[in-house]
Amino acid sequence: DVIQQVASRRRYRLVANVISTLKDGDADLRAVSSNALAKIKDSKAMGPLSEAVRADKTNSELHKKALLAILGDLSRDEVIKRSKDKDSLIRQLAIKTLFKFTEGGRPHPSVLQVLKQRLGDTDKEIRRSAAFALARINDAGVVRSLLKLKKDPDGAIREQVAVAVGSSKHPNADKLLLEMLDDTNPGTKRAAVDGLRKRNVKKALQKFRFLATYRVVEVRRAVMRGIVELAGAEGWESFFGIWQTALFDTDPEVKTWAAKGMALRRDPRVPSLLGTLVTDMNKQVQLTALEGLGKSGQPTAVEYIARGLMDSKREVKEAALKALETLNLEAAKIPLREFINNEADTGLKAKANDVYDKLP
């Protein structure tokens, strides 16, 4: 309580006392001290916090957050100064903090100079932090600098090159991103997929096809979204098989995007496929499937939507009612009558009655 009061009042003369508790034998007290220092934001705590990151494995991440909070409260010039600190962790986090001075795409020249210099740093994490910040600056010169690293041995650096190219106006951006799809680093592949999707490069769809079952889930997520948005309803038949397989993926986000793709066309095959997702363990998958079934225009969708009415989650029941309303078929009256007779939630019953009365 005393430490928290010091933090809330920002009693700087007592900071030394709070710092000393970073070495206390009680892990909970060390955590309280770290949180307090994050609120006080006194730069004198940076060195001790850096030591605590290394010594206190239990609260290591908490101490890092406290360091970032203090750095985030410093001026641009002070952060640049800290980016040259003798403590490697403080240098790393200072470079990460410089990212906030790049927002808007036109950073101060001093920030840009430091970030470019740090691309050649011997510390891997500092290089990565500098590349991360530079990749989000909308500047042709910065993109050219990063492109020199497209063959860098560190996959995390190559990933940031892909991020930069994806949002750039480089004349060969599309070609470069297509090449990056073959990178061995999953993060680079994902960034290239996202870049190609945002740039609406339909030529990428053939390569996406072969990445739809890639072993790394983040790549599969990006690819499935990319296929849905680039192929659209026009490519439905071509990618039907891929979406059908993805409906049974172990990842909810992949399944959600596959369901969105499947729902792009009114086809008799859609209800039985989306119907399997109505009872999925993931709520978002359920909601997406129900929305697709409601838009399917298929009479067979009614029985699958009805399963949603029996779900324990109110939001899923509401989605099922909305789907039956959108489907607008007389056959929906049967499950609606049963729902109205058995549902305890008066609000849902009222909604069901409203839907029932509007049906043909």
Image (cartoon, rainbow, N blue to C red):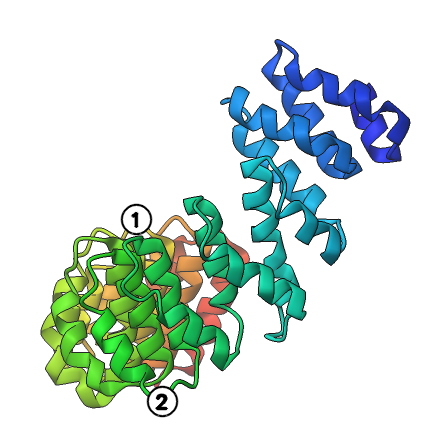
- Whether residue 307 appears in this view of the structure is no
Cβ atoms at labels 2 and 1 below 8 Å apart: no
Callout 1 crowding tier (Cα within 10 Å): few <14, some 14–19, many ≥20: few
Q: Residue at x 77, y 22 (%)?
A: 18
Q: Position of residue 212 (x, y in %)?
A: 17, 66
- Seen in the picture, residue 215 relative to 243 is either above or below; the reply is above
Would residue 345 be found to the left or right of residue 18 on screen?
A: left
Q: Which residue is drawn at 41% across and 68% down?
A: 146
User: Which disc, if any, is residue 171?
Assistant: 2
Residue labelled with disc 1: 281
Q: Nearer the viewer, residue 242 or 169?
A: 169
First in sequence: mark 2 or mark 1? 2
Q: Which of 16 and 24 is in front in this view?
A: 16
Q: Could you tell me which secondary element the residue under label 1 belongs to? A: loop
* Residue 201 picture location, percent across and down: 28, 85
For the C terminus, the image quarter is bottom left
